Image: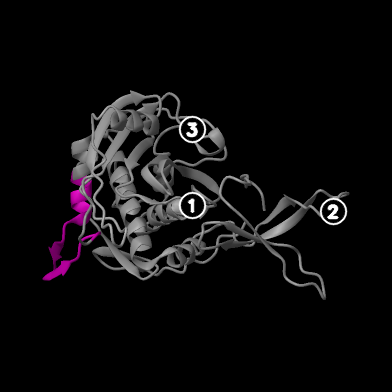
Amino acid sequence: MRSPNPGSSVNFAKSCRHCCIGRSRVTIQAFNTGSSNTDISEINAESVQEAIARFTTPIVQDGRTIPPFISSPEWDWTIHCVDSTPSTNTALWQLLQDNQIQDNQIQDNQTQNCIPGCPPVLIARTQTKGKGQWSRQWVSPPGGLYLSAVLPFSIPVHAQPILTLATACGIATVLKAAGCPVDLKWPNDLVVGGKKLGGILIESRLRGDRLSQGIIGIGMNWINPTPDTGISLHALLETQPVANIRTLSDVAALVLLGIQAGIMHWQTHGSEAIAQAYNQVLVNTQQWIPLPSDDDKQHPKRLRQIIGVDSRGHLIVRAPIREGDAVTDMTFAPGTIAIGYGQH
């Protein structure tokens, strides 16, 4: 498995760090998170909002103003925290259904672009029935980040795969800007050194040909135990310290800002731009995977090489090229094939 060279530039200055999602520039400024006695696993609505404020407030240093992490328009997240829930996605759907919280959708009916309201977020300290891709259980002991956010606008049904890519790309880019070497495994895994750091699960409800409501679920390892194929962000930071990330609330703030950055870049520059940015941090590029072959009965699976993703969010794979053969590419939508960990 090869990790391609990131195409987005990262410049390290004395008091701030910059990164680009395609052509959209975002900034993370260094800050002092306070006493080392802070409970790094504690999380509540107030501490997450405070972390977001630190990342988004301009600071003046050495006579110059360092711009905020995300410029306007900002999404004014409405954050709710609970000790435990079966699944943050399921609980958030239930809260919406019972009208205990509002989805706060505001939309420009001409452009279909989002005009951010106050999208609700639910964070749990633990989940008892966390969900992942392929209906797998996401083990969710205390110490991890388990977060779900309402998508603040509706989108066409066919755009859900690219929404997943935009969300993943935004989070990965923001974490890279903070100093964490995070890449992506298609379609929705955050990885470091080939090990899983976190995952994204987007669920939706339809109205006609549009997703009328959507929930973006994020699970990320912080100080919780992980399997052999996983890695925790705190363990990584013990060997590669990052001044911007000290607590679980900081992680949650960066994830929310990453969701915003990725979706805003998609809204502004389109699906092609998201696919280009995503391919820059895709670890599966040039990886060989076994896939079924309809024209080969004796060898039902042939190795094909991953080329990248297209503007629909589909994976592009290529058959081995023999002399005189034409290039043959195949595409696969998310959820139609699985790429395991440890494949090369």
Q: Based on the displayed image, in which of its 4 quarters is residue 303 positioned? A: bottom right
Q: Nearer the viewer, mark 2 or mark 3?
A: 2
Tell me which amino acid carries mark 3: Trp
Asked if 231 appears above or below 95 in the picture, the reply is: below
Taking the image as shown, residue 208 lies to the left or right of residue 260, namely right
Asked if 276 appears above or below 251 in the picture, the reply is: below
Asked if 205 appears above or below 22 in the picture, the reply is: above
Q: Earlier in the sequence, mark 1 or mark 3?
A: 3
> At which x and y percent is residue 39?
26, 34
Label 1 to label 2: alpha-carbon separation: 30 Å
Q: Residue furthest right?
A: 298
Which element is circle 1 on?
helix
Q: Name the residue tied to disc 2.
A: 296
In the picture, the disc for residue 138 is 3
Is residue 38 in view? no
> At which x and y percent is residue 207?
39, 43
Other residues around mark 2 within 10 Å, as few (<14) / some (14–19) / many (≥20): few
In the picture, the disc for residue 161 is 1
> At which x and y percent is residue 282?
53, 58
Q: Residue at x 14, y 68 (%)?
A: 65
Residue 108 lies within the magenta run:
no
Q: Residue at x 88, y 49 (%)?
A: 298
Q: Residue at x 40, y 65 (%)?
A: 270
Which portion, as a residue range, is magenta? 50-70
